[in-house]
Image (spheres, rainbow, N blue to C red):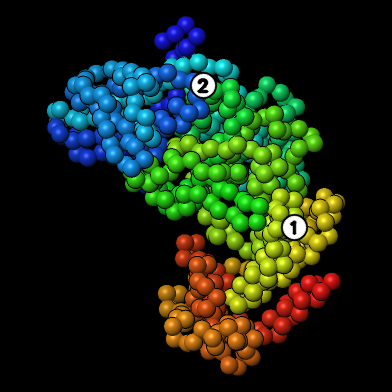
């Protein structure tokens, strides 16, 4: 270690978490001689390729305390998933393993220990990682959370992050913006700053938090985080440890935390994304099962990421000032627009992530409105040749064919409000506009209510029409039966999910839009009159 280098704590290696054990340590009969504990996982694997590229570290130390005797291997995994052992020794009790980065094969993606029990009854007491290198600046981060009447979630997260941050001396400060004005200072830890706010949506709440963080001063990083997430403190440990040693030429790098599904905790929704000049949006790492070694390796691959979801997003504080705040989108696409405007350089790190509820669990007409309006604004600001009319038409037709007439109306409302311009968006009351839009939301029914009102015997029995049972040409000529009179439609109700295509609604009189995860849904009925009404409205608007 040189005079200008120092050894610094990186993260504790947690051993398990209910429901996603193999994202932490893969144990195989470790309690008996010959059993193994493999740390080459999503959370405990060390992103060595990114540390080599972006930081000024020269070596790392892995510290263990074990009961019994083990063979301690240090392995690396390459992009083709080849495993190479670069260190192997028998150890017992408390021990350190130091690895110089110059001794690591060039094609290594991540590095990890593997312990093999040499006797029965071996136990791992603790495990942690330290980095050694040149620290150009000690990071300090403000975490901004925006909440609206989710007191239980925000209290839990504020208390957990505060306690763990104090335990590990993490340089962070939490700011909570309360859009519902339902929290009090007594509800949260003393060190947390609470800002009461009107319901201006996520974009408005985050703006208030960003202004507060900027006014406080002393932060070089901003972490934007949803209130209803579940977080392991290892995500913040890994992030802060990475930023502590970052090279000066990468000082403006942003880190997008991945989103994992709360109900399937090993499955990833997205690890950063790209919104291109044609209005095409692509997320990376969709549906990766991060309990699998090959997916952990693939997830380390770098992409052209130009936005990150605000469930967890870390960016340099220097971008934040009074004149550079999120547009008043309320919800949807505010994170994408802000990242594109700031031209953020974004990477992801395995282990920096949160668990979040699926978005389709809360999907309703108001979300359709914000998606449509804000997507169009996003395209008008940042795209060269996005086909706005086509985007509206595709979404409108999809909802009309699926009998979601309220959502079709929401598409047109979003289109009309977009055409009024960005100044109109800035002039309206976000809360009043949201109240108006929310009137289009469907009333979700319980399983029993749906069975009673729709006529299906049970929700697993809806009649689904395969596109192979009718000719595709007939479907298209009748606009997938949307233009057929109702008396030509079948009397039987179908049970539909968000994944079903519009072909499944061919000649369907009644549709049950059911979420099998949340066990609720809503009922729609075929209406040629509604289809004609919204098509005519769209065509009239197009001519103008």
Locate residue 518, reporting x and y percent: 50, 61
Dot 1 crowding, Cα within 10 Å, few <14, some 14–19, many 20+? some
Q: Nearer the viewer, residue 86 or 89?
A: 86
Q: Is residue 129 left or right of residue 210?
A: left
Q: Nearer the viewer, residue 479 or 247?
A: 247
Q: How many marks?
A: 2
Residue 129's quadrant in the figure?
A: top left
The residue indicated by pointer 2 is 245
State the residue lying farthest toward the bottom.
487
Residue 222's quadrant in the figure?
A: top right
Q: Mark 2 and 1 residues: CB-CB less than 8 Å, in contact?
A: no
Locate residue 160, reporting x and y percent: 52, 33
Locate residue 36, reporting x and y percent: 22, 35
The residue indicated by pointer 1 is 434
Q: Is residue 104 left or right of residue 385?
A: left
Q: Residue at x 30, y 22 (%)?
A: 64
Locate residue 407, reporting x and y percent: 66, 69
Mark 2–mark 1 distance (CA, rounded to whole Å): 44 Å
Please determine whether, in this image, residue 526 is positioned above or below residue 11: below
């Amino acid at each position: 270690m040189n005079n200008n280098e120092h050894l610094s704590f990186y993260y504790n290696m947690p051993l398990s978490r209910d429901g996603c054990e193999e994202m932490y340590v893969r144990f195989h009969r470790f309690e008996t001689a010959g059993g193994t504990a493999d740390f080459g996982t999503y959370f405990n694997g060390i992103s060595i390729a990114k540390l080599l590229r972006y930081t000024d570290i020269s070596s790392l130390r892995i510290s263990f305390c074990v009961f019994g005797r083990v063979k301690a291997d240090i392995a690396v995994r390459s992009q083709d998933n080849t495993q190479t052992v670069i260190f192997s020794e028998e150890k017992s009790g408390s021990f350190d393993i130091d690895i110089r980065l110059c001794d690591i094969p060039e094609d290594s993606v991540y590095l990890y220990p593997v312990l093999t029990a040499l006797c029965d009854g071996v136990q791992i007491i603790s495990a942690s990682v330290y980095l050694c290198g040149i620290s150009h600046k000690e990071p300090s981060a403000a975490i901004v959370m925006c909440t609206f009447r989710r007191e239980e979630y925000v209290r839990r997260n504020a208390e957990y992050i505060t306690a763990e941050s104090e335990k590990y001396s993490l340089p962070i400060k939490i700011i909570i913006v309360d859009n519902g004005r339902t929290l009090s200072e007594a509800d949260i830890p003393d060190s947390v700053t609470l800002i009461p706010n009107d319901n201006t949506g996520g974009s408005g709440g985050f703006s208030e938090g960003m202004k507060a963080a900027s006014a406080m001063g002393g932060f070089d990083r901003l972490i934007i985080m949803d209130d209803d997430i579940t977080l392991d403190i290892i995500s913040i440990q890994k992030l802060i440890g990475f930023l502590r040693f970052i090279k000066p030429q990468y000082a403006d790098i942003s880190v997008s935390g991945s989103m994992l599904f709360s109900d399937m905790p090993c499955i990833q929704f997205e690890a950063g994304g790209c919104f291109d000049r044609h209005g095409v949006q692509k997320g990376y790492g969709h549906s990766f099962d991060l309990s699998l070694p090959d997916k952990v390796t693939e997830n380390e691959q770098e992409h052209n990421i130009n936005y990150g979801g605000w469930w967890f997003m870390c960016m340099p504080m220097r971008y934040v000032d009074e004149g550079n705040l999120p547009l008043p989108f309320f919800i949807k696409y505010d994170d994408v627009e802000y990242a594109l405007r700031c031209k953020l350089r974004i990477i992801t790190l395995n282990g920096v992530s949160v668990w979040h509820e699926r978005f389709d669990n809360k999907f309703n007409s108001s979300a359709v409105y914000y998606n449509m309006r804000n997507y169009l604004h996003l395209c008008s600001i940042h795209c060269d040749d996005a086909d706005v009319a086509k985007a509206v038409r595709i979404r409108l037709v999809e909802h009309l064919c699926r009998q979601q007439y309220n959502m079709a109306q929401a598409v047109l409302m979003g289109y009309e409000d977009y055409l009024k311009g960005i100044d109109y968006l800035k002039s309206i009351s976000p809360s009043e506009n949201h109240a108006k839009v929310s009137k289009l939301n469907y009333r979700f029914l319980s399983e029993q209510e749906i069975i009673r009102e729709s006529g299906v015997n049970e929700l697993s029995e809806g009649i689904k029409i395969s596109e192979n049972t009718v000719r595709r040409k007939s479907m298209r000529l009748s606009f997938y039966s949307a233009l057929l009179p109702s008396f030509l439609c079948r009397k039987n109700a179908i049970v539909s999910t968000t994944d079903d295509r519009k072909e499944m609604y061919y000649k369907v009189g009644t549709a049950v839009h059911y979420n099998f995860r949340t066990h609720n849904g809503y009922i729609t009925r075929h209406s040629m009159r509604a289809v004609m009404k919204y098509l005519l409205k769209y065509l009239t608007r197009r001519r103008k």
